[in-house]
Image (cartoon, rainbow, N blue to C red):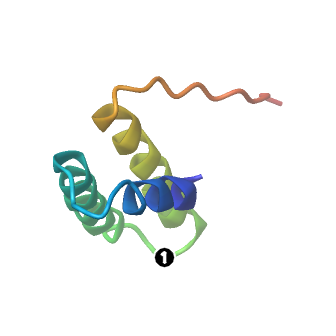
Amino acid sequence: MSQAVNLAMESVADEATHIQARFFEGVRTLQEIASEFPEGEQREALAAYATVLHFCYLNRLNWLVAGHAG
């Protein structure tokens, strides 16, 4: 999902928009934070989750996640 978000932000327009700049700046910060965790699936999951959440925040979107606890 986070790869789709990155592709969407990269392909918005030829000119960088304010939201694109804030998005990529935020992604760099999120990756720095995630780098404090040990390498592995948990670090990647944290970075991916935070990236999508950041995208939704900047674009004023609600991200609904359906799942099953078991």
Q: Quadrant of residue 66?
A: top right
Across and down, in percent, residue 63 comes to 52, 28
* Front residue of 32 and 16: 16
Q: Quadrant of residue 35?
A: bottom left
Across and down, in percent, residue 69 comes to 77, 28
Residue at screen point 48% across, 76% down? 39
Residue at screen point 44% across, 73% down? 38
Q: Which residue is mark 1?
A: 39
* Amino acid at the residue labelled 1: Glu
Across and down, in percent, residue 70 comes to 83, 30
In the displayed structure, does residue 44 sit left or right of residue 31? right
* Front residue of 65 and 14: 14
In the displayed structure, does residue 9 sit left or right of residue 2? left
Residue at screen point 19% across, 57% down? 21
In the displayed structure, does residue 56 sit left or right of residue 64? left
Q: Is residue 58 above or below residue 47?
A: above
Q: Is residue 13 above or below residue 57?
A: below
